[in-house]
Amino acid sequence: MEIVILAVVIALVAIGAISGLVVGSRRKKKLPPPEAPPAPPTITAPPAEPHVGEEAETPREEPRRTIEEVGLPTAEEALEAPAAVEDPLVAAPPAPEIEVPEPTAGRLVRLRARLARSQNSLGKGLLTLLSREHLDEDTWEEIEDTLLTADVGVTPTQELVERLRERVRVLGTRTPQELRTLLREELLTLVGTDLDRTVHTESDLDTPGIVMVVGVNGTGKTTTTGKLARVLVADGKSVVLGAADTFRAAAADQLQTWGERVGARTVRGPEAGDPASVAYDAVKEGIAEGADVVLIDTAGRLHTKTGLMDELGKVKRVVEKHGPLDEILLVLDATTGQNGLVQARVFAEVVDITGIVLTKLDGTAKGGIVVAVQRELGVPVKLVGLGEGPDDLAPFEPEAFVDALIGD
């Protein structure tokens, strides 16, 4: 029995020993190290391409100076202030070249051919009708229709026809030259030769002459203001421009471009700002600079008569704190004909128009608008536009205008 127990004990001890050896060996066994990431593939760069000229020409040995041969600045030169070298990339742009406008004297005469191309049909039509052997009622009606079609207006047409009928009856025989002379005299009477067509730009006070330009947008108002600046500069006057049309985005830029071409400064304000404030500042700057004339370009909105009256009335009142306005010019598009007269009536009720500028007169055969608008407003046409060129604005001369109507 004892022997059996002893055998069991020995067996248990042996099993325990074996188990300890196995566990110890497991604890001492090291885990294999983690696998290292694969090395990146080796990329072989292609051989560098030769630069331009490297294969065409082998390098040449050039003489080189030693440090002893290089001239160094003296102590006095090293202490001098360094001279600034202007970088052409960041240098200020050159100032625009100032143009010299062509003289205004006789400008309409020089532009007469352009005017005659559009207006000649009126004069030729009248001369053809007057040259008929028998001037019956039908012929006189045709003469009236010709004048009315040219936008002369009803009342002026009736007056002209009555005078022509009387003079033709008294004249009796009618040679072509006599008819031409007769028609020229009557047309001159109709256009008016005794009206003051001077653009008044001289103030009675010790201030610049102040000219306000009004008109509907689209008639060429801002362009006319810029061209008028050229006319005044050509006559030897210094000009300051006031960009008081703040409601049209490009108006101030457009006016400034015109001014820069003749050396006239432009006073402008923020977009949609107060036009009266800009006009006031323009006159103030004109006084400070001792300018001869201040030209003020106003807004041309015609939404309601009340709004227009309030705006232009305010500009006029504010400007007159410096001095009275010497000229208020109304710009009309000659191609609009009788519709232009409607615009003229509205502006005439708002401000005291002193003169009319007819633009695009070379683009219409209805030159009679000159007569009609003068009769409607009771003020003279002082300037006419005869093209898109910068010097195509000319003082209105009745004789040159009538000569263009009836041709040579």
Image: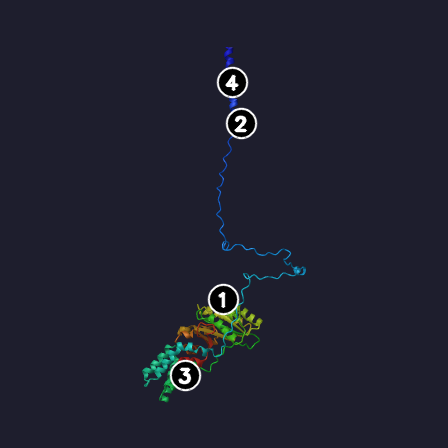
Q: Earlier in the sequence, mark 1 or mark 2?
A: 2
- Which labelled disc corresponds to residue 28? 2
Comparing marks 4 and 2, which lies closer to the viewer?
Answer: 2
Crowdedness near tag 4: few (<14), some (14–19) or many (≥20) residues, C-alpha within 10 Å: few
Q: Position of residue 263 (x, y in %)?
A: 53, 71
Task: Name the amino acid, label 1.
Answer: Asp
Q: Position of residue 119 (x, y in %)?
A: 40, 77
Asked if labels 1 and 3 touch by Cβ distance under 8 angstroms, the answer is no
Cα distance, mark 1 to mark 4?
111 Å
Comparing marks 1 and 2, which lies closer to the viewer?
Answer: 2
Asked if labels 4 and 1 touch by Cβ distance under 8 angstroms, the answer is no
Callout 2: helix, strand or loop?
helix
Callout 1: helix, strand or loop?
helix
Q: Earlier in the sequence, mark 4 or mark 2?
A: 4
Camera-nearest residue between 309 and 88: 88
Crowdedness near tag 3: few (<14), some (14–19) or many (≥20) residues, C-alpha within 10 Å: some
Q: Earlier in the sequence, mark 3 or mark 2?
A: 2
Q: In the displayed image of the protein, which residue is found farthest to the top?
A: 1
Cα distance, mark 4 to mark 3?
151 Å
Residue position for label 3: 184
Q: Position of residue 320 (x, y in %)?
A: 54, 73
Asked if labels 3 and 4 touch by Cβ distance under 8 angstroms, the answer is no
Give the residue drawn at x 52%, y 13%: 6
Q: Position of residue 51 (x, y in %)?
A: 50, 53
Q: Earlier in the sequence, mark 3 or mark 1?
A: 3
Residue position for label 1: 253
Residue position for label 4: 14
Instruction: Name the colouring of the figure.
Output: rainbow
Comparing marks 1 and 4, which lies closer to the viewer?
Answer: 4
